Image (tube, rainbow, N blue to C red):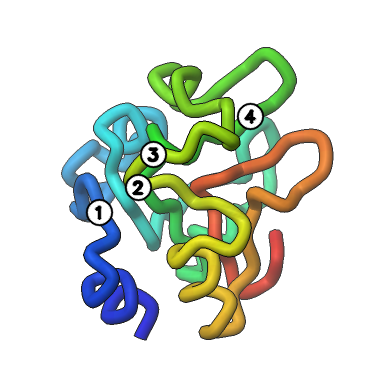
Amino acid sequence: SVFRTLWQAKFPIRRLQPVSAFRGSDDASMAADNTSGFNCRFVSGARRWSQHAYGEAIDVNPVENPYVQGARVRPPAGRAFRDRDHLRAGMAVSGGVLVRAFAAAGWQWGGRWAGSPDYQHFSTTGR
């Protein structure tokens, strides 16, 4: 239902390939601006499974929606999209179609995380 809503709204999804096309590398998938779901990997910087490992999280357009940890931005090309007030196609923003579509399905957005927003991240658990 989420992707049907996005399709009908003509929301651009830059790339949508299994992470196996990137040999399981989250960094390579993000650098390619790949929207991805299931990926058996740890949480960034931790030794516990990510919600992606359980199929309970999706990252959408990682370049347009980077993960920001202080001065570190993942993927690096996402630096151009740190300014969330300068809206461009493919971005997840509060009140935008992407965030609303996932919220309607009961999923939570990582762009609301205090301190280290993960604009690309949507999950069933809020983690």
Residue at the spot x=39%, y=19% of the render? 77
Q: Nearer the viewer, mark 1 or mark 3?
A: 3
Q: Are marks 1 and 3 in contact (CB under 8 Å)?
A: no
Q: Amino acid at mark 1?
A: Pro
As helix, strand or loop, the secondary structure at mark 4 comes to strand
Q: Nearer the viewer, mark 2 or mark 3?
A: 3
* Mark 3: few/some/many CA within 10 Å (<14, 14-19, 20+): few
Give the foreground label among 4 and 2: 2
- Label disc, if present, on residue 12 of the rendered structure: 1
Mark 2 near mark 3, Cβ–Cβ under 8 Å? yes
User: In this figure, which residue is indicated by the disc labeled 4?
Assistant: 68
* Mark 4 crowdedness (10 Å alpha carbons): few <14, some 14-19, many ≥20: many
Residue 14 place in picture, x, y as percent: 22, 46
| For marks 1 and 2 on the same chain, the one whose residue lies earlier in the sequence | 1
Q: Nearer the viewer, residue 77 or 30?
A: 77
Q: In this view, which residue lies farthest toward the front?
A: 86
**Mark 4–mark 2 CB contact (< 8 Å):** no
The earlier-in-sequence mark between 4 and 3 is 4
In space, the residues marked 1 and 2 are separated at their CA atoms by 5 Å
Q: Which residue is mark 2?
A: 90
